Image: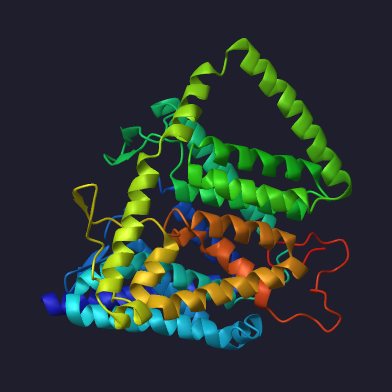
Amino acid sequence: MIFFIAVGALAFGGVCVWALVALIQRWQMIGLYFIAAFAVIAWELPDSPSLVSIAGVQIKPEDFISITLLASALTSIRQMSRNLVRVGPFLGLFVLCLAISLASGLMHYGTQAFNEARSTIWLVAAVAWVLSRDWSQSSASLPRLFLHCGSLLCAVAVIHVVVYGWGGADSFVTAATGVLQTGRPLVSGQALVLLCCGLSLILTSGAIRVPDLLVGYVFVAVSILCMHRSIWVAAALGLLVVAVSLRGRALASTVLLAFYSGVVLMCLLASGALAAFGVTVSHALSSDGTLNAREGSWTELIDQSIQQGPQTVIFGASFGAGWGRVVNGLFIDFNPHNWYVVLYLRIGLVGLLLAAGIIGYAFIRVLRVSRVSLAVLTAICAYAWFYHLPWYIAPWLGLVLYSAHRQIVPDGRSPVRRGQRAPLGVAME
């Protein structure tokens, strides 16, 4: 009986995957909305519930979505090859390194390896799907995605402030779902998505629609007010790109907005209305316990890797090896909160150098073809120094890589028709 139930469940899952693949093949924007939906609910459900258990492995909604995205990507290999000019082999080698690490981990540690690799698998699957699509005709659809996703995240942040208050770096509350969660309005991954939405709207829509430019700045401001220092660094670098990129009406509107915002801020500070908020900001700036713990974790884990010999340094330890280390006399085993350190620990210097080369080449490319992608890529790379990249950042990371590596028409410009707004993933002046 159990066998027939398992077969029936697999058959039902296969039909669902086929239906979703057909859906996103027909309307590819739905795929982006599926991924973005997980960013909206990340505060309430940081760990999504299991759909079913197979051989002791809990299958989550993200697993199901990842399988669907991979199946869709495999139907568009030719389009993916056009989108990955020159770097396709290097991306393939990077994925191969991850696959070898996972396979080795499954052999030595069993399902623990898969559980540890989940977030990386989800991110790679979603980015691969984005890179298998043609986004050149999505100049209107992509800004709408940024607007919808950013608006929902702002609404979520406001609701959390009303219900739980405006917490700082060390505050925690119990969510309605029973999860102990940060007291800040959004988790760091949500704030990163909101920041990317804001930067994208500022640079794609600002020169044509000033209201969209202003909405973009609101998104950036809310992401900063979520009190994540990693987002402050990412926002500073992203806004630096914005500062040297804006021209004409967009630049004039930005200067006026900055001036009047400064006047209002000075008035509020003088009246004392922001005294409590100033205390929260001051505490966030002066608190270094979390940063010291993270730096200690990175150092300890890298030292452990070196002590295990050249093979571990070059190729990494397999997924499932865990993150156990002793910092300040305490044993801890959570993710080290640094995407680059995680890559080094699991796929070694080989994998890390492959990732660095792909990202470095993307930076060189987007400097010429897309200031939007430059701002977003800068923000994501800065954030990755403080956290593991959440998988739902894949639409933005994938579109950046798409704009950097896709095939360009002979005259050197991307195929944007006159009068269209250039979306993230289409070249901009």
Residue in front for this viewpoint, 74 or 304: 304
Quarter of image, res 217 = top right
In the rendered view, does 299 fall on the left or right side of 369? Answer: left
Please tell me which residue is depicted at 18% across the width and 76% down the height of the picture.
110
Q: How far from the left and from the top, in percent, is residue 428?
A: 79, 64
Examine the rendered structure and indicate whether residue 235 appears above or below residue 423.
above
Examine the rendered structure and indicate whether residue 130 appears above or below residue 193.
below
Q: How far from the left and from the top, in percent, is residue 36?
A: 51, 56
Quarter of image, res 102 = bottom left
Quarter of image, res 133 = bottom right
Among all residues in the image, which is located at the extreme left? 1
Please tell me which residue is depicted at 14% across the width and 79% down the height of the picture.
3
- Judge whether residue 40 can be spotted in this image: no
Examine the rendered structure and indicate whether residue 283 appears above or below residue 306.
above
- Judge whether residue 72 can be spotted in this image: yes
In the rendered view, does 199 fall on the left or right side of 206? Answer: left
Q: Quadrant of the N terminus?
A: bottom left
Q: How far from the left and from the top, in percent, is residue 167?
A: 41, 30
Please tell me which residue is depicted at 54% across the width and 71% down the height of the picture.
24
Please tell me which residue is depicted at 41% across the width and 85% down the height of the picture.
96
Q: Quadrant of the C terminus?
A: bottom right
In the rendered view, does 111 fall on the left or right side of 116? Answer: left
Q: How far from the left and from the top, in percent, is residue 286?
A: 45, 33
Among all residues in the image, which is located at the extreme top? 271
